[in-house]
Structure formats: C-alpha cells, structure tokens
Amino acid sequence: MSGLREQKKLETRTALWRAAMTLFEERGYDAVSIAEIAAAATVSKMTVFNYYPTKEDLVFAPMEDHIDEFADVVRDRPAGTGAITALRAHFLARLAEFDPSTGLNDSPFIVAAQQLIVNTPALLPRLRAFVFRSEDTLTEALAKDTDPLTGRLAAAQIMAVRAVLMFDNHARIQAEGRATAALPGALAAANRAFDLLEQGLNGI
C-alpha cells in the first residue's frame, strides 16, 4: 500500500511541475500565480504548497535532487580510482542516458525549464545558490583525500566544467533538436573537458 501512495505522490508532484512549466513557458515566470498552477493541475493551492513550498521550488526542485551527486560519486568511488576518473565515467554514463542533469535532454518540459532559468533574472540567485551548495558538498568530499584549500580549488574547477558542459548541451539541443543527434558532440566535449581537468588537477 505504501508503494502505491509513493507512486501517487510522485505522479502528483510531476503533474504539478509540468503544469507550472507549461504556464511559465506560455506567459513567463513572473506572470503566473500559484493559484493558476493549482487550477491547471486541478488541485488546491494547499496541495501545491505541500509539494513545492515556494514558486521557485517548482522550477528548481528537480535540479536540486542533484546537489550531492558529484560529491557522492567522489565518496563512493572504488579504492584506487581518482576523483576525476570517477566523475568522468559518471558524467559520460549520464550523457548516454540523456539525464536532464547533463543538459542533454530533449523533453519539451526539460527544455522549457532550462530556457526559463537562463532567461528569468528573478531565478538567477537560486541558480547561483544551487551551484555554491553543490560546490560545498564536493569540497567536503575531495578534502578527505587532500588539504581543504586544494579541495575547494578543485571543486570550483570541477563545478565550472559541469556548468559549461550543461549549458553547451542546452545549446546543442536548441541547434540539433534531438538529444540523440547531439550526443556524439556532447561526449567529445565532455572527454575533452575531463582531459583538461586531469591535466590541471594532477593527482586528484
């Protein structure tokens, strides 16, 4: 029974997010109210707030599920495997799966969310906060194998590469239309980026 409840919650959460993305794409983030999102999803305002406490959460909650992702890869990597090696393998695997966190996903809802974030000034502080929180967790993971300053410098470079690859993949989707067509270029760019990281962060 609990499995059915969790499935229902996931379906409601997804329906709310999609309703919000549709309205935001049609009218812009600032012009849409929580009440209108609730009406579009045929639920109450309270239901929306139960799943997404703020309007910003409707945009960023799926992304923020990935805040600890790179830190987890570093912490959980096999003994003897370098952090950059583990992160490269992880990112390439996510690209091949067209995971939205890589930017290489052509779902209309994902594309709408990506465009909304980069084109809405009111959302940029939350985006920066996501980047800083992800960098902090990665710093902690890296610092276990090196000194704190090296860990922070390495985390900053790794997260910068992640952001560049993600936004480049957004552009590839816009140009090519299909994620499958954009995949070879995305894989080549990711390998080049991680090559440069390995050269610059020798021993990490």
Image (cartoon, rainbow, N blue to C red):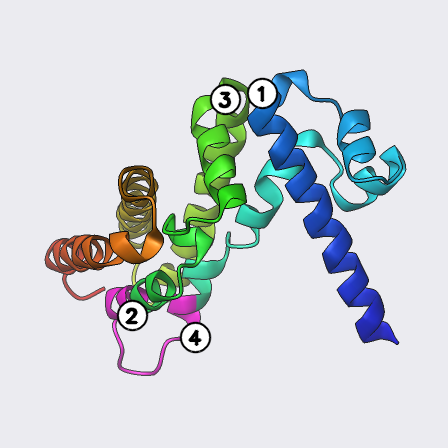
Q: Which mark, residue 127?
A: none
Upstream in the sequence, badge 3 or badge 2?
2
Tell me the element at label 2. Answer: helix
The residue lying furthest to the bottom in this view is 79
Q: Residue at x 69, y 21 (%)?
A: 32
Q: Where does label 2 land, which residue?
A: 89
Q: Where does label 1 land, which residue?
A: 28
Tell me if I can see residue 154 in this picture. Answer: yes
Q: Residue at x 72, y 43 (%)?
A: 16
Q: Which residues are magenta?
A: 73-88
Q: Amino acid at mark 4?
A: Asp
CA distance separating discs 3 and 2: 33 Å
Q: Amino acid at mark 2?
A: Ala
In the image, 81 versus 16, the foreground residue is 16
Seen in the image, is 107 located left or right of residue 83?
Answer: right
In the image, 97 versus 160, the foreground residue is 97
Upstream in the sequence, badge 1 or badge 3?
1
Would you call the spot at circle 3 few (<14 residues within 10 Å), some (14-19), or many (20 or more)?
Answer: few
Upstream in the sequence, badge 2 or badge 1?
1
- Predominant secondary structure, magenta span: helix
Nearer the observer: mark 1 or 3; the answer is 1
Q: Quadrant of residue 56?
A: top right
Residue 60 coordinates in the image, percent (x, y):
58, 40
Q: Which mark, residue 120?
A: 3
Seen in the image, is 170 located left or right of residue 126?
Answer: left
CA distance separating discs 3 and 4: 36 Å
Is residue 78 located in the magenta-colored stretch of the structure? yes
Tell me the element at label 1. Answer: loop
Q: Amino acid at mark 3?
A: Thr
Tell me if I can see residue 57 in this picture. Answer: no
